[in-house]
Amino acid sequence: MSGSDSADDDAVDDETAPDGDRVPVLLVRGDREYLVEPGDEMGTDLGVLEVPPDVQSGDTLETHLGDEFQVRRLRGPDLFHHFERTGAPMVPRDIGLVIGETGIARGDRVLDAGTGTGVLAAMMARAGASVVTYERDADFADVARENMALGGVSDAVDVRTGDVLAEIDDLEPSSFDVLTLDTGDAPAMVEHAPDLLVDGGFVAVYSPFIESTREVAETAREVGLSNVTTRETIQREMQFDERGSRPTTAPVGHTGYLTVARNE
Ligand SMILES: C[S@@+](CC[C@H](N)C(=O)[O-])C[C@H]1O[C@@H](n2cnc3c(N)ncnc32)[C@H](O)[C@@H]1O
């Protein structure tokens, strides 16, 4: 169970995850938001909530003091707020860019490294892909497996403990439609992209740093990948008030650079 004060067609059933896990739901009231499993009992500042085993999205639950919470189905962006965090997760906006730029869809086989919190891996699985993801930190990998269960995608995401570069010989050539890389050593993995990808497959590399990004782009060209493009993923939030409309004056946060290249 987790709580926070702070939101695609999901290939996930409302009541039962593909592997039989109990699928958590969100309980929402104003800016209160709690992730609970069917059958849980939870204390809140508004009283105790008992979550029935057959709870459904759309239900309304009352605390013992009479305050109402709406039951909501967990959707992709909720994973970012509720997964237990280890390696810095990609924000939903940047995951949208990865999925849009590479066309990840139902039936795709994706190789992902490193898993980290697993938000990218889980959202790709919810879009219909089968994901093999490597995490070299064993504790992080354990947390990621729990997060996959939470997201209802344990069946679609194979979290492997290990350094992806050390395991490269165990991976079948031309067996992936997309490679997604979010590690400091991504340039070394890009060297293997032509061997690992099917013809026409994509590699997408996400990095917060320009030095590594440049190395990725140069390596991608050297190994013969085509259509190599790098973009900063920044977006400006708009502010609408009585004085007018403009981008918000609050600092604009940099998240990362996304390099995409194709095997053709
Ligand atoms: C920035 S996080 C990835 C976050 C992930 N994309 C997400 O959305 O949650 C990077 C992770 O990669 C792992 N890592 C770094 N190099 C690796 C490698 N060569 N093989 C496997 N895991 C690696 C790190 O331990 C870390 O947990």
Image (spheres, rainbow, N blue to C red):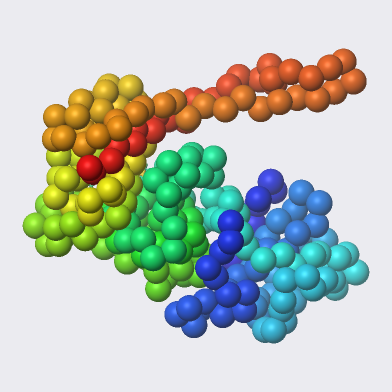
Image quadrant of residue 168?
bottom left
Residue 22 sits above or below residue 160 on the image: below
Location of residue 117 in the rendering, given as x and y in whole percent from the top left corner: 42, 52
Image quadrant of residue 16?
bottom right
**159 horizontally vs 233: left or right:** left
Location of residue 115 in the rendering, given as x and y in whole percent from the top left corner: 34, 53
Residue 167 sits above or below residue 229 on the image: below
**260 horizontally vs 167: left or right:** right
For the point 75% across and 53% down, the residue is 32
**Quadrant into which the C terminus falls:** top left
Q: Nearer the viewer, residue 148 or 233?
A: 233
In this view of the protein, can residue 43 be seen by the observer? no
Location of residue 87 in the rendering, given as x and y in whole percent from the top left corner: 38, 46
In this view of the protein, can residue 116 be seen by the observer? yes
Location of residue 62 in the rendering, given as x and y in whole percent from the top left corner: 84, 71
Q: Nearer the viewer, residue 88 or 11?
A: 11
**Quadrant into which the N terminus falls:** bottom right
**119 horizontally vs 48: left or right:** left
